[in-house]
Image: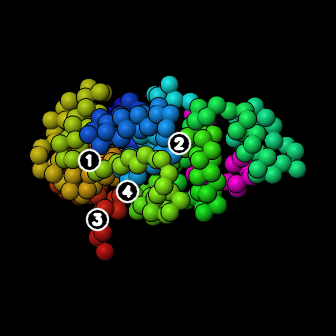
Amino acid sequence: MNQFLEAKNLFKDDFDLEGYLDSFSFEHAKTELLRSLNSPDIPLIFLLGNPGYGKSYLLKFIEQRADAIKIAKFISLPYFTEREFLENLVEIAGVQAINKRYDLEVLMKTLKDRLNPLEYTIIIDEAQLLNHKQMELIRILSDMRIFKFLLAMHKKDGHKILAKSHFKSRTNSVIYMEALKKEEIERYITNRLLSRNLSNIVSAFDSSDINFIYKISQGNFRLMKKLLSALFEIIDVAQQENLKKYSKIREATLTMAAIDIGLINVK
């Protein structure tokens, strides 16, 4: 495989945990998440950050690597009715909720009777999509200490929810994901490429290239990866077509990559 094609695959926008980013923001959020998840006194956890800061990636890390955490359900997109949600949770408790006479109170009592307090965690990503009834149901279940809930959402939406009176008085944990620093981006690029022995590509980057990547991505984890993936694809194609001007890492190819993923508008 061509080295630049291999490099492109290393920076796909996916949840490959081999490419875990040990930045200050990731490590701090991970430490705080594990502390809150292991606490017997915190039923509701909010993970807040701007889109692309790595919230979903960190949730996948917790799901796959935190063996001591009992995760009952991981919901990527919260598209469900309140009844569907409760019936799924009741099945976790070992009960088939097929009796149509069950109402919400009966379902919640079943959960309360069957499960140890806060033994299991429900993770919901993109939780800003929850409607008022769904959010209220989660608040009630956490108040009853049946489940822990870890809700990841956009920072602005999270602040609106936390400002509401019935969340202000609750015991919860609020954890933030922040933008990457320039040196963290450089270290991530270096470590990711060296993991596949692509040291010659590492040496092709200079400080101005890193400055460009940091400035154009604004420290956004997802955008940084998309930019690099597009960059390496452009160089791979240019080398195959013997287009020497675009066969190296330079401002021209970085600009083309930024245009390709919509970070620079040429209109």
State the extent of the magenta-drawn residues as a range.
71-86
Q: Amino acid at mark 1?
A: Leu
Precedes in sequence: disc 3 or disc 4: 4
Residue shown at 29%/27% (left/top)? Answer: 195
Looking at the picture, does residue 248 appear above or below residue 166? above
- The local secondary structure at tag 1 comes to loop
Q: Secondary structure at mark 4?
A: loop
Q: Nearer the viewer, mark 2 or mark 1?
A: 2
Residue 264: assigned label: 3
Q: Measure the alpha-carbon separation of dots 3 and 2.
A: 43 Å
* Mark 4 lies on residue: 50
Q: Secondary structure at mark 2?
A: loop
Mark 1 — residue? Answer: 180
Q: Which residue is mark 2?
A: 43
From the viewer's perspective, is the residue at label 3 or at label 2 nearer? 2
Cα distance, mark 2 to mark 1?
A: 29 Å
Neighbor class of circle 1 (other Cα within 10 Å; few <14, some 14-19, many 20+) is many
Q: What distance separates the C-alpha of mark 3 from that of mark 4?
A: 20 Å
Three-letter code, disc 4:
Asn
Magenta span contains residue 81: yes
Q: Which mark is residue 67?
A: none
